[in-house]
Amino acid sequence: MSSRGCFGNLLFALLVLVVFGASSYFWFNFFVKGKSVSTPNLIGRTVAQARAICSDLGVNLQIDPKNTRNSDKVPAGAIVWQNRTPGTTNFIKRNTTIRVELSAGPLILRVPEMAGQSPRTALLRLGQVNLKLGNTAYFESPGPQGIQAEDPPQGTVVAAQTPVSLLVAASPAPRAFVMPDLIDRPLDQVRLALESRGLGVSTVKYEAYPGIADGIIIRQFPLRGAPVSSHDSITVVVSKQEDTSIIEGPPATATQ
């Protein structure tokens, strides 16, 4: 085959390819794209504007009546979300429904009421409303305990993650003592002496100890010299003589 014949065949093949591509593009636009439209961008539009746009394109607009979304950029009542991605490359067929949600405007945060609550509870509540705990100051008070004041005050409108400082009333610290030596002292006398200072024996254990009378303390905890207060538990071990008497039972019956 001559070079002219090969060139002619190649040219014919290229011509067929161009004609096929042009035909495919034409029929795609006629049957598919001709019945489709680009997905409109409705974000930020009012409901009236969105309805007009959808009407011109031949698509349906559906507004979610139950769900709204807070937004710092989209004013309240305008469209803030749509279920189809907008763009000239995103085609939808006519009569397609676009579902949208409306903006509820910026999220308004207020400092919650926390009077009388513990700082731990306040930390949880602040986290639930997208705020955070600031400085916490304590003062001793024999009266009501818990949070007494907040800064910013309760009900103040604040931005997200605003720190809230607390003033907390706490019970006065218990008076501290140095643990005395209780060994070899009668339990009854020790109880009276400790109770007169706001202390008390919480646990008493008994143990046999030969040569020591009943009711004498033989061990103690905390040990002598340790710091102790009314919040601490005091445990003592007290001597108690074993009962060594012989219990007489009924006479044994002789067996045959």
Image: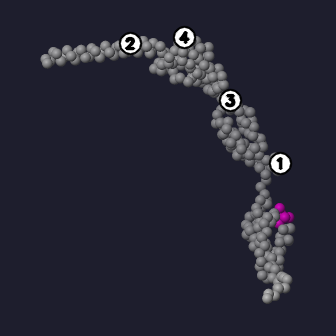
Between circles 3 and 2, the one closer to the viewer is 2
- Note whether residue 153 is visible: no
Which residue, as the protein is rendered here, is positioned at the far top? Answer: 56
Residue extent of the magenta highlight? 194-198
Which residue is painted at 45% across and 12% down in the image? 34
Q: CA distance from mark 3 to mark 1?
A: 35 Å
Residue 200 image position (x, y, % from top left): 81, 64
Q: How many marks?
A: 4
Residue 48 image position (x, y, % from top left): 62, 14
Q: Nearer the viewer, residue 27 or 107?
A: 27
Q: CA distance from mark 3 to mark 4?
A: 37 Å
Under tag 2, what secondary structure? helix
Between circles 3 and 4, the one closer to the viewer is 4
The residue pinned by badge 4 equals: 56
Under tag 3, what secondary structure? loop
* Quadrant of residue 187 within the rendered picture: bottom right
Q: In the picture shown, does residue 199 fall above or below 136?
A: below
Q: CA distance from mark 2 to mark 1?
A: 87 Å
The residue pinned by badge 1 equals: 143
Q: Are marks 2 and 1 in contact (CB under 8 Å)?
A: no
Badge 1: few (under 14), some or many (20 or more) residues near its Cα, within 10 Å? few
Q: Amino acid at mark 4?
A: Asp
**Marking on residue 26:** 2
